[in-house]
Image (cartoon, rainbow, N blue to C red):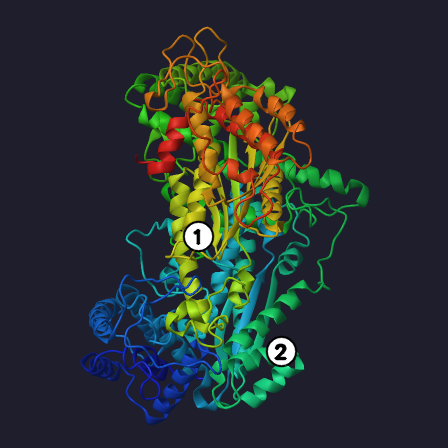
Amino acid sequence: MSDFQVPWAAKSRALLLPSGPVGLLSSFGPPAGVARAMDAWLTEHGAGADADDAQLRDRCARDAYDAQAALPAGLSHDAPARVVPRHPLSAAPLAEHPIDAAVAAGRWEGFWRRFLDEIQGAGAPHLATEQGYRALFAAFVDAADAHLANLPAEPRLPDCRLSAHHALTSALVGARHGGQRAALLYLHLGPVQRFVTAARRTHDLWAGSYILSFLAFQALSAVARRLGPDAIVSPDVVRLPLARRLLFGRRAETPRDPWLLRAALPNKLLAVVPEHAGKACARAAIEAVTAAWETMAEGARSILHAAAGGLSWDAGFDEQIRHHLELDAVLQPWPGDRAEASRLFAELQRGDVLDDVWPPEHPDRPGLAYGPLFDLTHRVLSAHRTAPSLHGHPGDARPKCTQCGEREQMGPRVGVREQAAACRAFWTGISADARDGALQITQGEGLCAVCVTKRFAPQAYFGASSGAGLELRWEKEHDRVLLRFPSVPSIAAAPYLLHLKTQREGVGSKADGWLGALHALHNLLGFTPPGNLLPGLGALGRSDDLLNHDGSWLYETSYEPDVCWRNHFPASPTDEDRAKETYRSIEAATPGALKALRELCAAAGEARPSAYYAVIQLDGDRMGEWLTGRHPQGPALADLFPELAQSAGAQRKRPLFSALHGELSRRLGGLAEALHEVVARHLGRVVYAGGDDLLAFVPLGTALACLAAVRELFRSPEYLGGRVTVSAGVAIAHWRDPLRGVLQAARLAEKSAKEHERRDRFAIRLDRRSGEDLSLILPFEAGGHDVLKAVRELVRSARRTALQPADGPQELGSEERPGEPRETDGAQGLEGPREEEGLISPSVAYKLADELRLLGAAPDDTLLRAFWHRVEILLGYRRKRDGRRTRDLPAGIRALFEAQGEDPSPALEPARLIDLLLFVRFLLREEKGLGGLHERIAERGVDA
């Protein structure tokens, strides 16, 4: 871009000062005193007034206003004196009281004081330079967040933040300076799904997600450094932890900022760029991504070179790395007038869209084309991405990678007949030397160049002095904990670990005995425990010796000598291994360690860890339609302007506008941060949270509560609002099941939830080690009731009241011991032993199956009433002898199976009730005495 000089001083004035025709922003703009102070400060720091720049700024401000404008042709009204700011997706009010000019003036005063405090941290920036403008932009956004949040850009734009208008004005000034034309640059980075989910362990899954997020940041940073961060419409820039550290040079309170290691960036970039420099910008972004990826790969290769002992193994390594990334870019010029735009959209048979937002009587207002222009750019990029790829990477006779199954694994190239044996010998030799905890190469693995890079990038790039620049060092134990991800047994056992932590005073000697036995075992295995990797349990690292150890040590099978050897060495023990002193020492030590575990568990009560965990995969519904303004639930003009409700055209959808993308990115950035906290509160860990996607691991007992909290967060006014719906898949599996199959189950569950016509559903796929697998697809709401809450109430109700008689057998799921006093619920009249034991009885589902046969294909109301009467008896909600209702079936359960209001069909067929009850019974069985803890976590968090 040597032929293009960015006008940093002109952009600085456009960002900070109110601009545009007389009347624009006048009522909500800064008071005269603040405006004069800003002008003087800009002049003092190298951005003095210029007549030509002022004219360009006014023209760009006019176009930025038009790009955000809410009113299509034929519908206009005077700017109101007072306005309620509204959510850009739901149109819900964002403030309790309307904003007027006096309120806006006060906010500007606060903004200016905060801005000066913020900018002092950057020294004395010279605004004619790129570094000075970056400091200015960061201070502007921080001060605007603090004092101008939800302040509309103009009274007729209640859903457009003022800071978004200023940023777009500045971007247009930079793109059009010198008589140039602006353009939209849309860039996509892939592959995503097949790269991330090609994982044999949770570390690989997290590493793939974070690598993609970091590479997306490289693209963003390349454009922001050339044109200024205001040029990035989406994703959000300043609030991103990586950007604050690497782009704006702002440090967190501690260098070990865990937010730097959280994957939170979508794989798309939208920017406003100069048309003539657009290709250079795209090329710079692609080069930055490619350079970072190749540096990661080279670091990973160096680790394997050290282990290979000079053996040639990496033929084709560079080719696989070079052919892996998929980078697509679309550069769409911004038409300068209506005639040019008409020709463009007419060629694509999209003229009707243009006519909706750009009336012919205003031919010289190109800002009105933003909505159709983005829609066109989005369609072109989508079509390009779905086109078949014509390139591939060269293959050979080496076996396929055991992790991705897509590319050939690395290893020496020999004759075809000897090839498989040679590769196997190479990787067996590598695995024999790999003793570095979660990053070891295990026997049977053979990785391609891409999977080698994914495996070792945390060590060789993100934790290296010459790598990502995160100031983390892999060799430092307190840094390495940030570069690792907890194992599935650690997640499955997290509630029990919390239980032990809360019981620590009462089990002190038993806990010390167990920890001492583990310490001795680890010495024999040459293994260093990873430390706590679950923020919901406590500080990451070695803050509590009870949390230092992997969760697999809480399961008795891990103490079998062969299993112990296989879990910590590269392979199952051979006869030769069993003859070694190390194995004999382990064989002698494991019985004592197992005894110590049993004594600890006995001292801690009846609770035991569940062997099951859950993977939650969640995605916003039809987000592409929200991004392009085509979603049927998008706000109508009457939602934004109630005073126009009776006007012709007031029910038309609000046209797409630029600030929507910036505002949506801002909200999604904050949502990603909040999602990490919510999942941590439920003792889980997020793999990826960015854009509108979430992938997280959580314990089984907190999975439903976590899913409910995540959905509530998505739809809260602070983030996406109540009109956006989500679909989720929940895969439940044993911690010993292969991870790849569990991830596949989560994807299929989410897909099945999305395939429903109405979406807004969650699907559960339960893979039991004993018994049949189970699948459920449930709506989040039925008849106005919260279904997740209803299912949890059903579990809680069964746990509390479905108790065995003193002389009866103890059923799975009961929390009382035989012969203990029975729980009493005097308010509901439940006292003494009950004849029907409800959900904990394994016969309930089968009895219901018999009842359902009586209903037939189309049961009438009488049969349905009889059916529900029988259901309530079987579940213990009525006394069997007199039929009297003793309590109510949780709200929402019955609503799932009955037509509601105008809806002629229920959400589920009655036969699906059996599956629901079997699922609830499974949850009860797997609580293993931790049900009360699960409920406290759901209601009040870990600290409660």
Q: Residue 613, relative to residue 671: is it above or below?
A: above
Q: In this figure, what is the number of numbered marks?
A: 2
Horizontal side of 45 relative to 411 (left or right) equals left
Determine crowd level at label 2: few under 14, some 14-19, many 20+ residues with C-alpha closer than 10 A. Answer: some
At horizontal 45% and vertical 78% (from top left) the residue drawn is: 71
- Give the quarter of the image for residue 884: top left
Element on which disc 1 rests: helix
Disc 1 designates what residue? 714
At horizontal 66% and vertical 27% (from top left) the residue drawn is: 854
Amino acid tagged 1: Phe
The image's mark for residue 291 is none
Amino acid tagged 2: Arg
Point out the image quarter for the C terminus: top left
Disc 2 designates what residue? 350
Q: Where is residue 203? Give x, y as percent.
A: 51, 42
Q: Which residue lies furthest to the top in this view?
A: 807
- Give the quarter of the image for residue 88: bottom left
Name the residue nearer the viewer: 907 or 547.
907
